[in-house]
Image: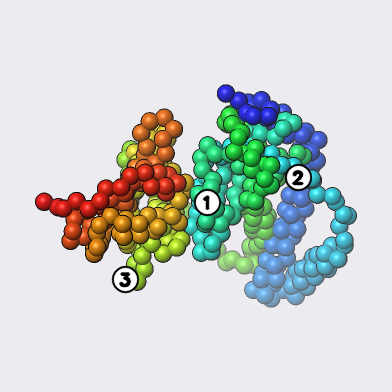
Amino acid sequence: MGTTGQGQAGQDVDEVNVPPVRKRSAVRGFLAALRLTVVSAVTGGALAALVVAVIIKDVPVFLTGGGVLVVLILIGVVAGRRSPADEEPPAGRIALARIEDLRATSGEMADVPVTFRLTVAPDDRPAYRVKIEQHINLVDIPAYRPRGIAVVEYHPDEPWKVLIVTRPTAEWSRRAEEAEIDSAPESTLVVSPDMSEGSWCMLTLFAFLAGAALVVLLFRAELFTSDNDGAAAKSPSSSSSASRTFSSSTTVSGPSTSLLAFGVMRVTAMELEARVDTAYVTAITIEDHRMAVRGDSTRPVSETVHLQSLPYELFPGLVREARTTLGVRDPRSWRIDVTPGTGAGAGPRVRVTVTGKEGTAHLDADATARITDRRAVRESG
């Protein structure tokens, strides 16, 4: 097996990244971190000096702290007015990528954030892995499934910048349908060399507090009449062991709210995924106001169902079909059961069951909501 028209996978990260680009990014990152540290520390010290001066009623200290803040503000205004040199953004290129895994988080809008693990396979370099987050419309999510092929845009000089092309051209759509891409090893995972947003925030906070603490220490004699040393007791850490099997359910509240409403079923599945902390389950049960999942961590992925790969938007149509065409004139309840398929390459099995005074009937469908079997009403004995 191999990629179609792609480079050989399995190279180290250093072979994928461009060394001069990483070196320049590292130097810029170090200078930016140093500048941020100095500015944050001076700002913290100046604000602390103002507070200390008010407490000890020292005018020179107050003027010094205020003067430093004014200088920092002026420097910020001047730097903001400087027009940075125009830099050509790196040109993006189109390639195919294998979806290794995806996980969507709940959102209030039609577009929800989805975390993808991809194997990007450019035409002119070895395949590599990358982890990205992108907002995808609820209706388009079923098109992206594990082991599926997607069209992406990547930057050769910054390969960690990858964007899924949601509306590719006809040629690239055809290539994606015909392509077979092997998974790249985990050792080829490419990450941005720059500091994350959380790291910048932590650096700013630490430098700010360090500058403030230094000023307080310089005036500790005037501020405190006695030294008070307190010891903070550490709360005992609790360890929890994950169970080998899990189950969880949730109920849609309100008599007028139903899981058949558009988008409610997928959002509920996202909530359950967050509760059980995995997208791979062994059974899904959906009723009018309730959804439940079960799973077993010892089961291989091929014997599970991926929560976000199901076409939830098409399930209401299956329910309507079962309630109107299987001989149940007055359906009292309905239920959808999703279980893993049997056999190599088999997708999940979907069964819709309706019950009424005439009896019970059901229809079966595949992972694309295509009906494969019907069982008309069967009188309950």
Between disc 2 and disc 1, the foreground one is: 1
Report the residue at 68% width, 29% height from top.
5
Q: Earlier in the sequence, mark 3 or mark 2?
A: 2
Residue situated in front as seen by the camera: 239 or 63? 239
Report the residue at 36% width, 33% height from top.
342
The answer to the question of whether label 1 and label 3 lie on touching residues, with beta carbons closer than 8 A, is: no
The answer to the question of whether label 2 and label 1 lie on touching residues, with beta carbons closer than 8 A, is: no
Instruction: Describe the element under mark 3 as helix, strand or loop.
Output: loop
Instruction: Work out how far the residue at label 3 is from the one at label 2, CA to CA, in angstroms.
Output: 50 Å
Report the residue at 39% width, 58% height from top.
316
Residue 92: mark = 2
Residue situated in front as seen by the camera: 299 or 216? 299
Residue situated in front as seen by the camera: 208 or 156? 156
**Given the image, on which type of amino acid does mark 2 rest?**
Gly
Instruction: Work out how far the residue at label 1 is from the one at label 3, CA to CA, in angstroms.
Output: 28 Å
Q: Is residue 285 left or right of residue 88?
A: left
Label 3 crowd (10 A; few <14 / some 14-19 / many >=20): few
Q: Quadrant of residue 148?
A: top right
Q: Earlier in the sequence, mark 2 or mark 1?
A: 2
Instruction: Describe the element under mark 1 as helix, strand or loop.
Output: helix
**Given the image, on which type of amino acid does mark 1 rest?**
Ile
Q: Quadrant of residue 243?
A: top left
The location of residue 136, given as percent across then percent down, is 57, 54
**Given the image, on which type of amino acid does mark 3 rest?**
Pro
Instruction: Work out how far the residue at label 2 is from the one at label 1, CA to CA, in angstroms.
Output: 24 Å
Label 1 crowd (10 A; few <14 / some 14-19 / many >=20): many
Q: Is residue 278 visible?
A: no
The location of residue 235, given as percent across then percent down, is 41, 51
Residue 322: mark = none
Q: Which residue is mark 3?
A: 255
Q: From this view, report whether residue 281 is shown above or below residue 69.
A: above
Q: Which residue is mark 1?
A: 141
